[in-house]
Image (cartoon, grey):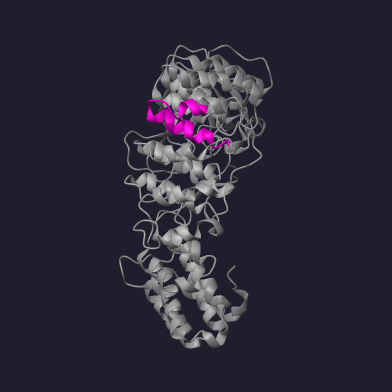
Amino acid sequence: MRYGMIILVSALFFLGFTSNARAYLVANALSLEDLKNQADLVCKAVVVSTQPVKDDWFNEVRGFEVKAAELKVISVIKGKSSKKTINFHYYAAAPGDIGIMYQPQNYHFTAGRAYIIFAKQTPDQRIFRQLWKAHRSDESQGVLLAADKSPHTSESITQIFLAELTNLLNSQEAQDVIYAIKQLDRMSDTTLDNLQNFDRRKVLEVIKPQLDSKNSKVVELAIRAMGSRNPYLSEGFAAGWLGTIGQGYFPGLGKWDLEKKYLGGTVYWKELAAVANAKGPLDNRALAIRALGRTKQAKLFKLAEGWVKDVHPEIRQAGALLLADFPKRVKEDVLKSLAEDPSGLVRKSAARLIGFGRFSKSLPILGRLIHDRDPKVAAAGALSLLSFSVTHNQKILEANLEHPQFKSLFINALAGQDPKPYLESLGLIIRKGLRPDHWWGGRVPWGISWEILFFYAQKQPAQDLKTKTMNGVFDSLESPLADNPDSPKYYSSSEPRDLYALYLQRGLEKRARKFRQACKKVLSYDIDYYFDMVDKNPSTYQRR
């Protein structure tokens, strides 16, 4: 997946959040060269001490304080500083956890450790500040923990970073190694920030020995780096992956880059398979199998066949996912066996396998799994089922329109093709805000129902809009204004604005006036501002 700007907290209309939390955007991390260009001073220095400081440049942010680190300069990489000791002002987390909703760019220093620091000069030549206030997607960018206190002579910031991180991998402290793996992985993989500071192949080469570490956390992170965030690596990736490769409708979920190559699993598949077959922690063994996803190495099929028969359900679960890379070689009886496994972990993975492998002939298995006694298995079955087109899954959806959990999703999928038979059901979804307990996210189901109904109304001839049926449709579209705790509320001005415009476009002036009055009573913002714009030219507002 690739992101330009990342929304960390969202209360936007139709997203999978129901709180009224504010949203804020976070800029991508910069390349090392861009980072260097923004700094007045780049130096390697030892932290002597840290203490709170008063600096009016910094805004007051709840949960954070401004501190000054006294630095003993080892070497200057960019800029000029005639001082052997300088002060670096920065945001630091304040003691205590108070439920932070926003955080600035902030750092933590350990006295006696060396760091590479990017800083801005102040009028006082002894004082420098962090580069920016708001944090970027790499929350520690601007400061790098160094491996030792030796000076640098190279002017290449890329070479300096690579040397420090590679040396940190040899540290006796597990936390240093963990830090180095995370930084190397992030700065050489395009998935998160589209950064390629380091050659990916070289990074994987220096990380590979950590697969043999005695520290399980180090091994875990080495495996994750090798897996390069492939779609099998995390359960949380399943919805986005099925939304990318399937023919279903999953609005609000990001798309995966189908051209991406997962170099770690391709080059080091033998090493990962060895971890999977070793006697280490089960979680790491299973993760090593997942890290092989999407590499499609032919020799892995036989290994996967063995893993799905393993005594441990965690291994069977991971092995089932890997079978999705070989859809032409997987037999139907294997799918049935996995779907009937005594472990919910494996049955859930069977549902994933059918979706990941696009086994359209096995949809009846999903039709049974959506009723599984384990709600997480049922949710996985519904997700995979909905990833297929209505051409394939229509009969199963129609047979389960009263499913206690997935009713809203199944109705929306069918109504997306032909809303007319489902007008009342769509209205119920909106009024009740229906959605599954174990839902995978994206645009909320009632929001999709609202748009299906709106577009249906938009297509109707003007003479048909005053019928009893259409009055019911309009009542449903207005139901977010209802004084009902079960009814969801509009999350933005565009929905009431566009509905108001539709009324005016179709000559429903009386209904428009009544709707406008209701909005003014219920909505907390100045909705008249948007309605006045509609009045000037109603035809401009054609929701698409």
> Residue visible at 65% across and 31% down?
196
In terms of image quadrants, where is residue 41?
top right
Image coords of residue 66 (percent x, y): 43, 35
- Which residue is most to the right? 155
> Residue visible at 49% across and 71% down?
453
Magenta: main secondary structure equals: helix
- Which residue is most to the front? 333
Quadrant position of the C terminus in the picture? bottom right
**Would you say 209 lies left or right of 478 here?**
right
Image coords of residue 373 (percent x, y): 31, 46
**With respect to residue 58, does 152 lie above or below?**
above
In terms of image quadrants, where is residue 339?
top left
The answer to which of 346 and 94 lies nearer the viewer is 346
The answer to which of 243 and 10 lies nearer the viewer is 243
The answer to which of 68 and 137 lies nearer the viewer is 137
Image coords of residue 71 (percent x, y): 50, 21
Q: Can I make out residue 490 in this image?
A: yes
Q: Can I make out residue 56 in this image?
A: no
**Would you say 403 lies left or right of 454 here?**
left
> Residue visible at 68% across and 22% down?
156
Quadrant position of the N terminus in the picture? top right
**With respect to residue 111, does 234 lie above or below?**
below
Q: Is residue 295 magenta?
A: no
Q: Is residue 312 magenta?
A: yes
**Would you say 99 lies left or right of 355 here?**
left
Image coords of residue 105 (percent x, y): 49, 37
Q: Over which residues does the magenta segment extend?
A: 304-326
